[in-house]
């Protein structure tokens, strides 16, 4: 994909994430996606997104910056929402969380095949703090 196409592709992916549309999200992810320090495969990816959207029904990401180089995409995001459901074993706190996120993707044929990025440490700290 050209750089401008990758920007558009990512905007569409982020829109699906912000709608919490799990089937649309699935369409952006390769079935055998590899994720650093997390279980691989699209089912694990979608399950994690489902857990987040159930725990934070109003969760939204806002893109701060995107850098595209070939099939690699680096993104700085802000994620925020109100903790209203169980998340990673943490009972609902009703706290509003706002975190910086950094994500690195490798995209082939319009699907994420590799991912690495910041974990949930900042989010967990806000819920437990």
Image (spheres, grey):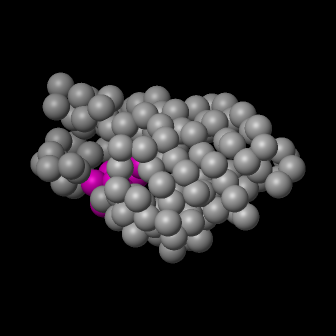
Q: Nearer the viewer, residue 59 or 49?
A: 49
As drawn, 5 above or below 95? below
Q: Quadrant of residue 36?
A: top left
Could you tell me which quadrant the N terminus lies in? Answer: bottom right
Position of 48 with respect to 128 (left or right) is: right
Residue located at (24% from left, 28% from top): 125
Residue 16 seen in this snapshot = no
Q: Position of residue 18 (x, y in %)?
A: 52, 55
Rendered image quadrant of residue 128: top left
Above or below, comparing residue 12 to residue 42 in the picture: above
Q: Nearer the viewer, residue 83 or 14?
A: 14
- Residue drawn at the location 73% of the way across and 56% of the way down: 9
Q: Magenta includes 102?
A: no
Where 110 falls versus 2 (above or below)? below
Q: Position of residue 27 (x, y in %)?
A: 59, 71
Instruction: Please indicate, yes or no, whether residue 10 appears anywhere in the rendered image.
Output: yes
Comparing 19 with 9, the one in front is 9
What residue is shown at x 48% (from left), y 55% (from top)? 34
Image position, residue 113 (x, y; %): 58, 57
User: Hey, which residue is sitting farthest bottom in the picture?
Assistant: 23
Query: Which range of residues does the magenta coloring cover?
Result: 52-59
Identified at 76% across, 38% down, the residue is 69
Q: Position of residue 58 (x, y in %)?
A: 40, 52
Q: In the rendered view, does 86 fall on the left or right side of 17?
A: left
**Badge count:** 0
- Considering depth in this image, is 2 or 8 the residue closer to the camera? 2
Quadrant holding the C terminus: top left
> Could you say which quadrant of the image residue 46 lies in?
bottom left
For residue 110, side relative to residue 78 (left or right): right
User: Residue at the top extreme?
Assistant: 129
């Amino acid at each position: 994909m050209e750089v401008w196409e990758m920007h558009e592709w990512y905007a569409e992916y982020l829109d699906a994430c912000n709608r919490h549309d799990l089937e649309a999200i699935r369409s952006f992810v390769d079935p055998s996606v590899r994720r650093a320090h997390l279980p691989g495969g699209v089912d694990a990816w979608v399950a994690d997104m489902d857990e987040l959207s159930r725990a934070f029904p109003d969760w939204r990401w806002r893109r701060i910056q995107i850098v595209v180089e070939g099939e690699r995409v680096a993104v700085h995001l802000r994620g925020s929402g109100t903790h209203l459901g169980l998340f990673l074993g943490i009972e609902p706190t009703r706290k509003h969380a706002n975190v910086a996120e950094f994500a690195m993707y490798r995209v082939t044929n319009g699907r994420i095949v590799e991912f690495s990025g910041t974990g949930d440490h900042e989010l967990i700290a806000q819920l437990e703090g």
